[in-house]
């Protein structure tokens, strides 16, 4: 398996196949980390997958058996890269892009999840101290999604990411509002499907 780490500038210069048609996206949240199990909101911190997370990533292989996947994209944070690497280790190219990162909670990176969740609604359009707003994170992810859609139309992609990734996908076509997405929690599904 080869994982390509790409900064935003690198992704624009990379060769891609272009097709006409819509892009199918499967969003997969990264597997559980040591921070998740401890009730910590990692943000831009970079904890490893927990033992349970590694097992869950291995199970993703079965969930995607029989589904043609042309490309896997993930954030460059270790938890997303490792989830992608474990789940899609055979033959599918994996591209890491920092624009797919979680919201930068600034001074609250590594704080208890309950503390971050309690103030998340206050930071929809106001950056966290030393970080970014949820809108800024979603705009960053959308930039990546727009580029992927231009370069990979008619392909099937898996995106391994974070809550910010899901917010960007849920609001991509304008059907959902960001504030409504914040109120919804990730359920226990292995993945969500989107047509972009």
Image (cartoon, helix red, strand yellow):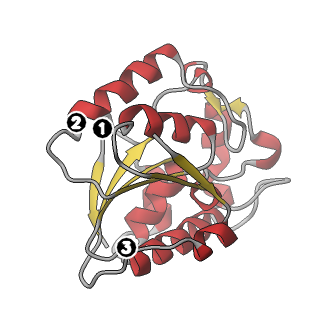
Q: CA distance from mark 1 to mark 2?
A: 7 Å
Dots 3, 2 in contact, CB < 8 A: no
User: Whole-percent x and y of residue 118?
Assistant: 63, 42
The secondary element bearing badge 3 is classed as loop
**Residue drawn at (59%, 75%) of the image:** 12
Observer-nearest residue: 163 or 24? Answer: 24
Q: Is residue 30 in view from this perspective? A: no
Q: Can you tell which mark lies on residue 190?
A: 1
Task: Say if residue 154 shows up in the picture.
Answer: yes
Q: In the picture, residue 166 is in which quadrant?
A: bottom left
Verify CB contact (< 8 Å) between mark 1 and mark 2: yes
Q: Residue at x 43, y 61 (%)?
A: 180
10 Å crowding of disc 3: few (<14), some (14-19), many (20+): many
Q: Give coordinates of residue 181: x percent, y percent.
A: 44, 58
The residue labelled by disc 2 is: 63
Question: Is 4 located above or below residue 41 in the figure?
Answer: below
Residue 61, x across and y down, in percent: 28, 33
* Residue at the spot 41% in from the left edge and 64% down from the top edge: 169
Relative to 164, does residue 13 appear above or below in the rendering?
below
Mark closer to the observer (1, 3)? 3
Q: Nearer the viewer, mark 1 or mark 2?
A: 2
Chain-order first, disc 1 or disc 2: 2
| CA neighbours of label 2 inside 10 A, class few (<14), some (14 to 19), many (20+) | few
Quarter the C terminus occupies:
bottom left
**Mark 1, other Cα within 10 Å: few <14 / some 14–19 / many ≥20:** some
Find numbered disc 2 in the image and state the secondary structure of the residue it sits on. Answer: helix
Tag shown at residue 152 = 3
Residue drawn at 50 percent across, 63 percent down: 179
Quadrant of the rendered structure where residue 22 is? bottom left
Secondary structure under badge 1? loop
* Pick the front one: 39 or 12: 12
Q: Earlier in the sequence, mark 1 or mark 3?
A: 3
């Amino acid at each position: 398996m080869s994982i390509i780490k790409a900064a935003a500038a690198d992704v624009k210069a990379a060769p891609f196949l272009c097709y006409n048609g819509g892009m199918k996206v499967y969003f997969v949240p990264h597997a559980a980390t040591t921070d998740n199990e401890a009730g910590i909101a990692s943000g831009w911190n970079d904890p490893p997958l927990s033992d349970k997370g590694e097992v869950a990533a291995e199970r993703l292989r079965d969930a995607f058996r029989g589904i043609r996947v042309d490309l896997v994209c993930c954030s460059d944070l270790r938890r997303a890269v490792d989830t992608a690497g474990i789940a899609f280790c055979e033959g599918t190219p994996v591209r890491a892009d920092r624009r797919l990162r979680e919201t930068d909670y600034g001074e609250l990176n590594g704080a208890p999840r309950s503390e971050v969740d309690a103030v998340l609604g206050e930071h929809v359009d106001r950056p966290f101290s030393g970080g970014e707003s949820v809108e800024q994170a979603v705009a960053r992810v959308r930039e990546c999604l727009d580029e992927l859609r231009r370069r990979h139309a008619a392909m099937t992609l898996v995106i391994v990411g974070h809550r910010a990734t899901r917010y960007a996908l849920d609001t991509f076509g304008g059907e959902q509002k960001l504030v409504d997405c914040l109120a919804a929690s990730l359920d226990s599904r292995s993945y969500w499907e989107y047509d972009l």
